Image (spheres, grey):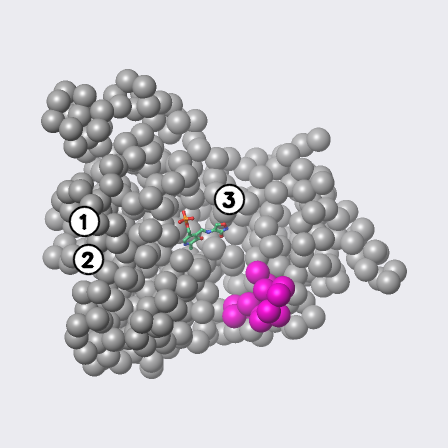
Amino acid sequence: MQRVYLDNNATTIVDPLVKEAMDPFFTQIYGNPNSLHDFGTEPHPYMRLALDRMYKGLNAPDDADILITGCATESNNTVLKGVYYDIMHHGKRNQIITTPVEHPCVANTAKFLESLGAELKILPLNEDGIVDQEILRRFINPDKTALVSVMWANNETGMIFPVKELAEAAHENGALFHTDAVQAIGKIPVDVRDANVDFLSFSAHKFHGPKGIGGLFIRQGLRLTPLLHGGEQMGGKRAGTVNVPEMIGMGLAMEMAAQNLEYELTEVRRLRDKMEDALLKIDDTLVVGRRGLRTPNTILCSIKGVEGEAMLWDLNKNGIAASTGSACASESLVPNPTFVAIGINKDLAHTGIRISLSRFTTEQEIDYAIDVFRNSIERLRKISSSY
Ligand code: 7TS
């Protein structure tokens, strides 16, 4: 049976060239980079090259920091908790502003800080399902807001947020601006200088790098209380021995993401649109969010009369890996805020199948997936109508 991986927003295949580049750092150049002997200093030029690739990939100025972390979850925790310890805990600015569609590693960290006394403001979405500058201006408080944290692109819908405008509004009100760019890197242009963000988080395994390594861009002049205290690694900004092989892999993966961006914006988008058009031809289906406002690889499709998990299992039996976008969190029956914001009919809102492509997805795979989706929807609708 053919197997087709359409869950690239969860994780991606490691590019074989990235894997090859990492290999020597397991068995040949394996010294601890903080050791003083030759084994320890040998990895340094390679680590420098990897960092340079990350600075270039994000267009980060040389005087900014890029911390190597264990994942985007760690990067996001570092920013929110760091701003809490450094600013909110001491001074009069005590408010975090964020959106209702952040990944749990931002949403739950913000809730944790609320339990410690921070004030949390969750912005409403506009009718496109995003937060725009006007909304932020309406809710930001020039005396109280310490941090605005808005993702660059959403993992479930692919919706892109106008981070440059949001950062501008945050700065005009004396607040810092953080963006979780996990789902943006490699899919749309990401330029920290142009967007003028203060903090930006990323995770290598979302752009064909290895799992368990991420990064945090910190604008020059800013310093965050570290999440991990310990040794003096990274100038004391993030303790713990750096995962050298994965850092090397992340640097190359970032460079390749930039090299493949044009392909992503044209060819991956073409295949995504082909799949999306085929799904929309089926009765009573819809796709969340306007195409022009989404990352080029993502579809969140709602299918009337089909239960999301039943559909996933049926797809899985036919070799297709997709995901349920939490259209409606099944235990709580709280509708996904994006569905509510863009006014999706409640009947449709309980199924959300997320399909996410990558530069490794082939046309033949999409043709096979379209066939499987058509048959699966027909079969499941027949079963549910017979009850
Ligand atoms: N931020 C966003 C926007 C994400 O999509 C994810 C993972 C993370 C942070 C966390 O990344 P990690 O590397 O620290 O785990 N998102 C998903 C997803 O949508 N399905 O599985 C993982």
Q: Could you tell me the amino acid type at mark 1?
A: Lys
Where does residue 202 sit, x and y in percent of width and height? 34, 49
Q: Could you tell me the amino acid type at mark 3?
A: Asn
Q: Does the magenta stretch include residue 332?
A: yes
Residue 269 is left or right of residue 329, and the answer is left
Question: Which residue is found at the position 51% from the left and 59% from the top?
Answer: 157
Q: Which mark is residue 237?
A: 1
Question: Which residue is found at the position 47% from the left and 39% from the top?
Answer: 12
- Residue nearer the viewer, 47 or 357: 47
Q: Is residue 169 magenta?
A: no
- Could you tell me which quadrant the N terminus lies in? top right
Where does residue 107 sit, x and y in percent of width and height? 41, 64
**Part of the protein shown in magenta:** 326-339
Q: Is mark 3 on a helix, strand or loop?
A: loop
Residue at the front extreme of this rendering: 230
Q: Are marks 1 and 2 in contact (CB under 8 Å)?
A: yes
Question: Which residue is found at the position 72% from the left and 46% from the top?
Answer: 314
Q: Give the labeled residue for mark 3.
A: 8
The reply to whether the residue tagged 2 has its Cβ within 8 angstroms of ligand 1 is no
The reply to whether the residue tagged 3 has its Cβ within 8 angstroms of ligand 1 is no
Quarter occupied by residue 26: top left
Where does residue 303 sit, x and y in percent of width and height? 69, 60
Where does residue 167 sit, x and y in percent of width and height? 27, 66
Rate crowding at label 1 as few (under 14), some (14 to 19) or many (20 or more) other CA atoms within 10 Å: many
Q: Give the labeled residue for mark 2.
A: 224
- Residue nearer the viewer, 178 or 258: 178
- Could you tell me which quadrant the C terminus lies in? bottom right
